Image (cartoon, helix red, strand yellow):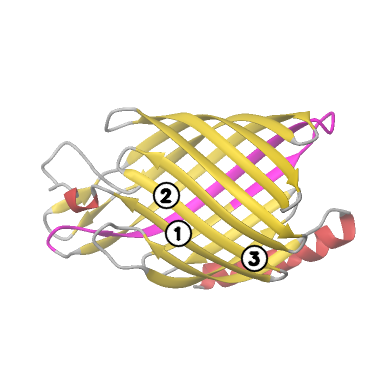
Amino acid sequence: MKIILLIALAILGLVGSLSASSKRDTTLNIYGVGARTDSTQSVKAGAGIMLDSEIVKLKVEGTSDYIKSGLVLKYNPFTENWYIKVGANYINQKMYAPDDSTARVNQYSGALGTGYMIMDDLYVEIGGSVTQLKGSMVGADYEVKNEKTNLAYLEVAKRWESFIGTIDTTANAGRVYHELSRDENSYGAGVDYYPLDNAKLGYKHQYEKNNISNVYSTQYSLFFAEYADNISTKTYQVPRSTFPKVECIQ
């Protein structure tokens, strides 16, 4: 909780500096979160705070099952058409074992991407990330092991203007390289619909084998709400410490 408060204060400071130095719109949202991170558990309620601007995106949110924070910085090194993004994430999450024991594990990641604006309403981006999972014993008989995971991806973003409002669409595909299990493909899509200038409805879907994420969001002016259904379909198979294979939430 202290970490969340410190980051919230940092966000407020960033808002002031961005307002003074940038002509871009900057919004600060405090919102409710409903999330399910395990296929055997119910939805848990929580809260989040998000700073959203053209050059900085910062989010901190949590429930009783997890605390998640992320930061993305974007800048144009040479031209307006070409940009570079760097990001970092931290997750502290409760893991559930079949014997009803629980433990919390930490996950750290860093990301780098670069994109190009082909047209005013069409972007292409490529990038990658590295994630380190710090494992833990779950009760006396089960274990989540340390694991490093790498991701490479390609994403396309397109904006559509119509008589019913503005629609932003994204599609991505990538390859996930696991240290302790087989590599797998990743793909996803998202849509943000703006019926008014200050209103938005959003949906994002991301799929990896045994790890599926659906995020629903809505915003009107300064009011924002989000529901995340992010489950691992094999969380009930947290292995015993003597087993070589690990199934865990990414």
Does the segment drawn in magenta span residue 74?
yes
Q: Amino acid at mark 3?
A: Gln
Task: Using the numbered discs, state the Cα–Cα distance from disc 2 to disc 3 in whole angstroms.
Answer: 20 Å
Q: Residue at x 64, y 30 (%)?
A: 125
Residue 99 location (% of width, % of height): 12, 62
Residue sitting nearer the eye, 22 or 136? 22
User: What count of labels does the image hold?
Assistant: 3
In the figure, 134 relative to 150: above or below? below
| Inter-mark Cα distance, 1 to 3 | 15 Å
Residue bearing mark 1: 228
Q: Nearer the viewer, mark 1 or mark 3?
A: 3
User: Where in the figure is residue 204, as x and y percent of width and height?
Assistant: 52, 49
The magenta segment is 71-99
Main secondary structure found in the magenta portion: strand
Check whether the beta carbons of the residues at disc 2 and disc 3 lie within 8 A of each other. no
Q: Which residue is mark 3?
A: 219
The quarter of the displayed image where residue 44 is located: bottom left
Measuring from the top left, give residue 216's x and y in whole percent: 51, 58
Local secondary structure at mark 2: strand
Establish if 150 lies above or below 47. Answer: above
Please tell me which of labels 1 and 2 falls first in the chain.
Answer: 2
- Position of residue 70 relative to residue 123, above or below, is below
Do labels 1 and 2 touch, CB within 8 Å? yes
* The magenta stretch spans residue 61: no
Q: Check disc 1 and give the amino acid type.
A: Ala
The residue lying at 88 percent from left, 61 percent from top is 20
Residue 157 or 97: which is nearer the viewer?
A: 157
Looking at the image, which is closer to me, 181 or 105? 181
